[in-house]
Amino acid sequence: MKKSDVAMIILIASVSVMIAYFVASSMFGGSANTSQKVQTIDSIDSKIVEPSPDIFNTNAINPSVEVQINSAPTQPGAQ
């Protein structure tokens, strides 16, 4: 290889690296030095709060209670 070929390869490589750097920095951006505000929650304590009566209805159907659907009560030994 001639000296001019080596110089051309070095020039093309350096220009390619600079183009790749600017393209990557435009796509991914630089580091931002801005501050962000985040929501924080209250700490958990041992106080128990009474549930809202709008949500927890005392007259609601209890799914754990057995319910009889047919009209005649079942008797032992009846067929």
Image: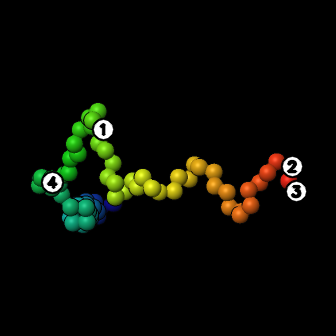
Q: Which residue is mark 3?
A: 79
Q: Is residue 15 left or right of residue 56?
A: left
Q: CA distance from mark 1 to mark 2?
A: 50 Å
Residue 77's label in the rendered image is 2
Disc 3 packing (10 Å; few <14; some 14–19; many ≥20): few
* Sequence-earlier tag: 4 or 3: 4
Q: Nearer the viewer, mark 2 or mark 4?
A: 2
Q: Quadrant of residue 55?
A: bottom left
Residues marked 3 and 2 touching at CB (< 8 Å): yes
Residues marked 1 and 3 touching at CB (< 8 Å): no
* Sequence-earlier tag: 2 or 4: 4
Q: Nearer the viewer, mark 4 or mark 1?
A: 1
Residue 48's label in the rendered image is 1
* Up-down relation of residue 45 to residue 62 (above or below): above
Q: Nearer the viewer, mark 4 or mark 3?
A: 3
Q: Position of residue 65 (x, y in %)?
A: 59, 49
- The amino acid pointed to by label 1 is Ile
Q: Quadrant of residue 9?
A: bottom left
